[in-house]
Amino acid sequence: MASTVLRNCSNVLKINVRQFTILPHVSTGVRHKTTIQYATRPDLPKLAYRKLKGKSPGVVFLPGFASHMGGQKAEALEEFCKSLGHSYLRFDYSGCGSSEGEMGNYNIGAWKKDVLYVLDELVEGPQILVGSSMGGWLMLLAALARPEKTAALVGISTAADHFVTAFHALPIETKKEIEEQGFWKFPTKHNEEGFYTLSLDFLKEAENHCILHSPMPVSCPVRLIHGLKDSDVPWHVSMQVAERVLSNDVDVIFRKLGLHRMSEKDDIKLIVYTIDDLIDKLTTLG
């Protein structure tokens, strides 16, 4: 079982002051815009990404469900990596953002392939994977499939197994109705419709990628940040992940007033400091 450390957030913010000069970039929204590039893949949609060259270990950002690489966290992390001189890559999954395809045609397995393509073809050396919400689930799947390419993991509101868990928690009658209709209007506060339409095929395919039911042979450092006010993905999911990974270097960091997106100024500072601490640790060990 992983050794899990619960940290007080005020203490976490003091972990490292060596890069304090980067905070104005994070807090004021100053942006260094890398150019959108497109990876052409045989029989797969073109993958849109932005890449910043630099030192190792690099950082790769994995967005959440129906999100894209232009969010506040993704932008702030690029500025942070630029200030340190470390490489950074952010991208859009198939059917999302600037990548080719329609989102409804893809699933967890397809997006996992996107992440593995990024690790295999678009970056060099082990990376710190930073996964937000569903990106945290994909980050864990990638770490299991490519341990040699994974230097460390930073999960933000990690949504491991989330759609499957939420579906199985529904009343029997509701599940029967969804199965008859062939789709589920998954409630959300993050779009105008108030729901995401998930096909039954999407849910069934997602079951093939559930990871919380058994130990995960992940041995790299793992940091899991979760808001206690997260009304989308319960904070105890991060605790489950911490207990399932085999690494002994696991910290779970709770923010008392943190919401699901963790995009407030102080949330982003915490994420930046956490990654900075990992880079320092990995560089020292290297």
Image (spheres, helix red, strand yellow):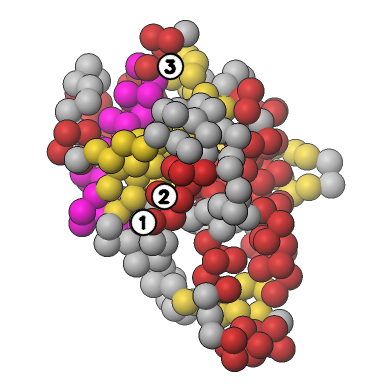
On the image, the x and y values in percent for residue 133 come to 46, 53
Q: Callout 1 environment at 10 Å: few (<14), some (14 to 19), or many (20+)? A: many
Q: Which amino acid does label 3 sit on?
A: Leu
Residue 235's disc is: 1
The residue range painted magenta reads 255-280
Q: Choose the circle earlier in sequence order: 3 or 1.
A: 1
Question: Decide: marks 1, 2 in contact (CB < 8 A)?
Answer: yes
- 218 lies above or below 48: above
Residue at screen point 60% across, 79% down? 184
Report helix, strand or loop for mark 1.
loop
Q: Which amino acid does label 1 sit on?
A: Trp
Residue 205 x %, y %: 72, 62
Mark-to-mark CA distance, 2 and 3: 23 Å
Helix, strand or loop at label 3? It is helix
The x, y position of residue 264, in whole percent, is: 25, 50
Q: Which residue is drawn at 40% across and 65% down?
A: 232
Question: Badge 3: few (under 14), some or many (20 or more) residues near its Cα, within 10 Å?
Answer: some
Which residue is label 2 attached to?
238
Q: Distance between the residues labelled 3 and 1?
A: 27 Å
Residue at (60% x, 48% y) in the render: 214
- In the picture of the structure, the residue carrying the numbered disc 3 is 282
Residue at mark 1 to residue at mark 2: CA–CA distance: 6 Å
Report the predominant secondary structure element of the magenta stretch: helix
Question: Magenta stretch: residue 119 in it?
Answer: no
Q: Which of the numbered marks, if any, corresponds to residue 226?
A: none
Q: Quadrant of residue 285?
A: top left
Q: Check disc 2 and give the amino acid type.
A: Ser
In the rendered image, residue 262 lying in the magenta stretch gets the answer yes
Please, which residue is most extreme toward the right here?
43
Q: Can the viewer see residue 274 in this picture?
A: yes
- Residue for point 53% across, 80% down: 170
